[in-house]
Amino acid sequence: MASRNSQPVTISRRGLLSAVSAASLLSLTQIPTRAFAANLDVEGFLALSQKTLQIDDLFEDVAAPMLKAFADIDRKDDLAALAEGAEDQALSNEIAAAWYSGVSPDPGDLEVITYTDALMWRAMNYTKPMAYCGGPMGYWADPPES
C-alpha cells in the first residue's frame, strides 16, 4: 500500500543547523538536574541551607522535617536543581524564611518544625524564646552589658 506522501524528505543546511543548535541548548536546561532530585537527602539539604544562609551550625534534626515539608509541597526537584547550581532567588528566600521562622514552608500546613532553634532568636539576640529560661533566678534585674 502506497503512502499519501511519497516524496522524500529533504532538509536544508539552515534547517539542520537550527536543529543541532536547539539540541545543544537542551543541555543547558534544568532537565538533567531533575534526575538528581531523588538523591537530595537530609545532608544535601543541610549543605544547601548552610550555603544559602551562610551559616555553618544548622541542625540536622531540624533539616530532616524541613526537607520533608518542602517535598510535601513538591519542591524537592527545585531544591535539587538549586543544589546543583541553578539560580532561584524565590526558593532561596523560602529556605531562609523556613529556617528563620521555624515554620513549614507549606502555606496550608504551618506546622512548627522548631521553635527554640529557629534562627530568628539568633538574629534577635536581645530576647529569647518565650518560656525559655534566660539565666539564673533574677537574671533580668541586671542591666545588659554594653
Image: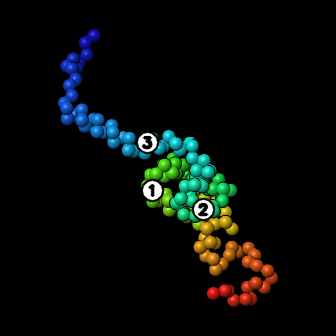
- In what element is the residue under mark 1? loop
Q: Position of residue 91 (x, y in %)?
A: 49, 57
**Mark toward the start of the polypeptide (1 vs 2):** 2
User: Which image quarter holds the C terminus?
Assistant: bottom right
Q: Is residue 78 left or right of residue 126?
A: left
User: Which image quarter holds the N terminus?
Assistant: top left
**Mark toward the start of the polypeptide (3 vs 2):** 3
Q: Mark 1–mark 3 contact, CB under 8 Å?
A: no
Q: Where is mark 1, residue-wise?
A: 88
- Looking at this view, name the residue that lies furthest to the top: 1
Q: CA distance from mark 3 to mark 2?
A: 30 Å
Q: CA distance from mark 1 to mark 2?
A: 21 Å
Quadrant hosting residue 15: top left
Q: What's the residue at 64%, 80% (across, down)?
A: 126
Q: Judge whether residue 108 can be spotted in this image.
A: no
- In what element is the residue under mark 2? loop
Q: What's the residue at 60%, 59% (across, down)?
A: 104
Q: What's the residue at 57%, 47% (across, down)?
A: 40
Give the amino acid type for the residue marked by disc 2 in the picture. Asp
Q: Where is mark 3, residue-wise?
A: 31
Give the amino acid type for the residue marked by disc 1 in the picture. Asp
Q: Nearer the viewer, mark 3 or mark 2?
A: 2
Graded by Cα atoms within 10 Å as few (under 14), some (14 to 19) or many (20 or more), the crowding at tag 2 reads few
Q: Position of residue 37 (x, y in %)?
A: 53, 44
- In what element is the residue under mark 3? helix
Q: Position of residue 95 (x, y in %)?
A: 54, 59
Graded by Cα atoms within 10 Å as few (under 14), some (14 to 19) or many (20 or more), the crowding at tag 3 reads few
Q: Nearer the viewer, mark 1 or mark 2?
A: 2
Q: Mark 3–mark 2 contact, CB under 8 Å?
A: no
